[in-house]
Amino acid sequence: MTMPASGASPVLEARDLQKRFGDRVAVDGVGFTIAPGETYGLLGPNGAGKTTTISMICGILARDGGTVSVAGQPVDVGTPAAKATIGYVPQDLAIYPDLTARENLSFFARLYGLKRTDAKARIDDVLEVVGLADRAGDRTDQYSGGMKRRLNIAIGLLHRPQLLVLDEPTVGVDPQSRNAILESVEALGREGMAILYTTHYMEEAERLCHRVGIIDTGKIRAEGTRRELVAMVGQRDKVKLSATGDLGAAAQTLAREPGVADATANENGLELIVDDARGLLPRLLQAAADAGLTVSTVEVVEPDLEAVFLHLTGRALRD
Amino acid sequence: MKALAIAGANLTRMGRDRLGLFFVVLLPIILVLYLGLQYGSSFSPKIGVHAEVPGVLGDQLIAGFGEIEPEAWGVVRFADEAALRDAVERGAVDAGLALPDRYDERVRAGETVEVEFLSPAGKVGIGIQETVRGIVAEQAARVRAARFAAAETGGSVGDQLAAVAEIEPTLPDLSVSTETAGSEIFPRELLGFALGAQSQLILFVFITSLTGATQLILTRTLGVSRRMLSTPTSSATILLGEALGRFGVAMIQALIIVIASALAFGVAWGDPLGTAAVVIAFSLVGAGAAMLIGAVASNPEQAGAIGLVGGLGFAAVGGCMVPPEVFPPIMQTISHFTPHAWAIDALRALAVHDANLFGVLPQVGVLAAFAAVLLGLATWRLRAALAG
Ligand SMILES: Nc1ncnc2c1ncn2[C@@H]1O[C@H](COP(=O)(O)OP(=O)(O)OP(=O)(O)O)[C@@H](O)[C@H]1O
Ligand SMILES: [Mg+2]
């Protein structure tokens, strides 16, 4: 995953978003920016305020406070023109079940203001992108869950938005469709699209997102790259070596290696706590060999966002 | 225009819904056909007749009822006039006709005779009265011709009547007067059908519009309306498009009923402009009511139930189930709280009293006000509901 060029002016700037429903504060001071070509993840459990945040960014829901601008234009409920820069893919399957995929696409193409001739070409393009070209004439109530999800995404791509907003786009799909969806999102990011991706699957956030905001009870609790987040909470990688030899002596030697915080022996081998397992691994294996150990397997356990979330909130990401 | 795209999607979806199509297209046609058969051909009244020594002319007159097209009337003879009156009052016959004693003899003698038409108090069909008048008028015309001939030639009225009967087909003025009586019968006969078709029109257009609210609710609950709001489309345009969709469905159904009944059974709706104005105004009322239900109901089942109960209830109170003419005054007043009553008033005025567009402007105005209030309320409620 290559980091997008920094310094370019951001596609999305959201500041201090506020929303309450009656007494319940759904979003409380959420703000972030997304650069061109950057994929930003909002990771949080059910009810964290992801959809509410997105709805305010897309100008669907009136906000109680804060500002949003996309491609330099302010966005709000009453600014239809500015919404042409955003492609919104809702969490619900917002498609007509009694229309075909092509009919759904041409309906939204008209709402996005595409000219008839452009629309035809764009519809063919996006059908190709999500791999539905051969089923475009079928009514969508005959689609599988994964196909519906893919059409749901295709609609948001019709007008070549500068910012693509995906609200949990892989919920309820089979692993194959899920992988296809993640691959198209990666491809769109490489083409330079700014992407806001919400999910409560941390594997997706880790795979797709350059930066992640961890959201809970309406607030961003932490933000950064995966490594930054992990470091922020003092989590380090774990390396497990299954080995035979003088384990106690080897543990003492390895503990003195730079980057190694701790090394302990157990009945199967050694367990090391290190700063950057991937970078250190060749040196660690060499040192183990030098200490007379015979290593049979190596396992690297990197702390994940799940652990970060647990650390930040004291709760698991999924209940 | 984006609003048209939204309305168009609504109509396409309606076209995909078999049950919806049945209600919008097929059921009204079936009912118009049913009504057409009911009133158009097999509606044959029974007439009670009392005649003492009717003679040839009296018998001819009575036989005339058996020759009415398209369906002969039933004739019941009564021995005395009191029995006839009684039968008419009890409704055992639809109307009564009392010929004076020695009818034939007195007509031939050149006397002026009066036949008495008996109708049950207050509720005789215009058609029946008009038909009887036509048959009597036909014979009267022949008698007058014979009298004229008798006066000219000096023969007896009786002789001249026979001559008139022979040459009648070649007498232009006589055949014209007979024709007039005959052709008047036809639209009068069908009037009952026209009234029925008017009620069906109002009842169906409203119910269909209301059940159309379920489409709007699906659009909301599926999240499609949210998604529409995320596109560069204003909420006003979205609401306009949805309202146009409902209005389109109502208009399609209204056109089907009006055109099918007019073409197949010659129902005379009256002034086309006036009819169009009433139909458009009432379709707008239906669209407004549908939008309001679409805004407040939380699921399609609920909307369907409200639509059916509300649709039938308003139709009953508004005078679509029984003719509003039989309502007591208090009900007449209550019924005018429904748009249905105003629409039926206007359609009656057009079909029965030959009113034109200007004549029904007051009713059309009231309907437009109903529509404006409903659409206003719906817009206010829907603006928030669209975002789901
Ligand atoms: N229209 C609404 N009316 C009242 N409360 C709402 C409304 N929409 C959201 N909420 C509340 O706001 C909070 C945030 O909801 P939101 O849908 O933004 O969460 P989310 O992070 O998208 O959750 P999920 O992962 O389940 O989609 C929740 O407590 C929810 O109950
Ligand atoms: Mg959500």
Image (cartoon, coloured by chain):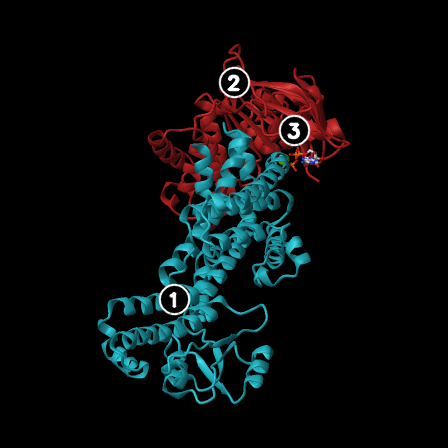
Chain colours: A red, B cyan
Residue type for callout 2: Met
Which sits in the foreground, B181 or A32?
B181
**Residue drawn at x 52%, y 54% as measured from the top left:** B202
According to the picture, the residue beneath numbered tag 1 turns out to be B186
Q: Is residue A97 visible?
A: no
Residue type for callout 1: Phe
Badge 1, how many Cα within 10 Å: few under 14, some, many 20+?
some
Answer with the quarter of the image where residue B295 lies. top right
Residue type for callout 3: Leu
**Residue drawn at x 39%, y 88% as measured from the top left:** B55
Answer with the quarter of the image where residue A302 lies. top right
Is the same chain shared between marks 1 and 3?
no
The quarter of the picture where the N terminus of chain B appears is top left
Residue A234, how many percent across, how many down?
71, 21
Label 2 near ligand 1 (CB < 8 Å):
no
Is the same chain shared between marks 3 and 2?
yes
Give left or right: position of B320 versus B147.
right
Looking at the image, residue B28 lies above or below residue A34: below
> Disc 1 vs disc 2: which is toward the camera?
1
Give left or right: position of B340 versus B351.
right
Question: Which tag, 3 or 2, sits closer to the chain's start?
Answer: 2
Disc 2 is placed on an element classified as loop
According to the picture, the residue beneath numbered tag 3 turns out to be A305
According to the picture, the residue beneath numbered tag 2 turns out to be A3
Residue A117, how many percent across, how many down?
33, 31
**Residue drawn at x 58%, y 53% as measured from the top left:** B341
What whole-number distance in Å separates the C-alpha atoms at marks 1 and 2? 86 Å
